[in-house]
Amino acid sequence: KRRKTGGGGKGCLGDPEELEQEDGLGGAPPGQRGGTAPAITWAMLTGDSPLVQEGLSADGPAISHDKTFQATFSNAHNILSELVSDMSEVAFNHDAEWKEYPDVAEALRAAGAERNCHCLVTCPSQGKWAVGIGSGWKARETAGKLALAVALAVGTERLGELMMTYPEFGDLCSSAGLGDAAGLAQTKQTIGGAVVPAITAGPAGGAMAPAITWAMLTGDSPLVQEGLSADGPAISHDKTFQATFSNAHNILSELVTDMSEVAFNHDTEWKAHPDVAEALRAAGAERNCYCVVTCPSQGKWAVGIGSGWKARETAGKLALAVALAVGTERLG
């Protein structure tokens, strides 16, 4: 399915140098940025975005077409075809002037994506969307197919398989920190283009730190409707990592100016917040009493899991610190 808007060719969005001078979004052409694969930029939509309201994920990857990586783009259609049984449901919506989809345009700006004509590519049945960026419509659709393949594969068992079958796709994902050829399952947080892999077990099978489980809410979730992010981290309290949890309050205090705005809402029976409970189930989080911790001013939420209220709040503080720090300079 295709819907083209705008010219989409030479002169798309005006002269790149003029755009860069006007709003700082031009940047260097993709081919001049270096790297072994095209860059993946993750854009985050707000809860009131039409796409989120329709049930699509709040975050989606954007890839700019670059002839330097022709081998990577050449298999875009084949890779996507392995993830979508009926390709006719994939819709391509071109936005040559960044006006048709203001929510997507704003998300791309915030993430620092290349300022060029873009194509929004959606797969409603799997709740995913992505963006292909390029001057020509064919380039945009090719980049969009590759980006949608990333959106559909990340966090699934197919990722490792596809990375091995298509080496260039493997390079693309590996360079973005999305996985490796061994197919280790990973989850991600995407804020301003940052991607954070899940903490995995060490070589001997013992975990090096508490696991972080990322839960994704739907567009009709009360939290999302209130302006909070669609995804949030959940951490289970574990005395094995007492040193990690002991600094939870101090770390969070460095990220929140007024700690009184941080709210703790306990749900011992998984009934008070059914949207969060469902997201935790889907993500495979530990089935135990939990506490939803929110910071409205920064639009973030997290979950602390544990048997005792103090353990839940401590784990929740640590999880909220993760949510607030990821994608910012403070993380390092």
Image: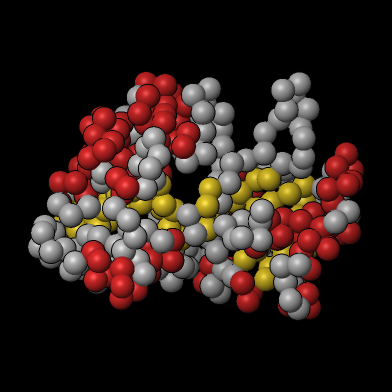
Residue drawn 10% across and 59% down? 10
Question: From the viewer's perspective, is residue 78 above or below residue 139?
Answer: above
Residue drawn 31% across and 73% down? 21
Question: From the viewer's perspective, is residue 161 above or below residue 129?
Answer: above
How far from the left and from the top, in percent, is residue 46?
46, 68
How far from the left and from the top, in percent, is residue 115?
29, 62
Q: Is residue 39 visible?
A: yes
How many numbered circles does the render carry?
0
| Depth check, front residue: 198 or 307 | 198
| Depth check, front residue: 118 or 273 | 118
Residue 51 picture quarter: bottom left
Residue drawn 67% across and 33% down? 200
The coloring applied to the image is secondary structure
How far from the left and from the top, in percent, is residue 201?
71, 30
How far from the left and from the top, in percent, is residue 72?
30, 33
Drawn side of residue 101 relative to residue 139, left or right: right
Drawn side of residue 285 relative to residue 90, left or right: right
Residue 78 picture quarter: top left
| Depth check, front residue: 15 or 319 | 15
Q: Is residue 130 visible?
A: no
Residue drawn 55% across and 64% down? 229
| Depth check, front residue: 317 or 166 | 166
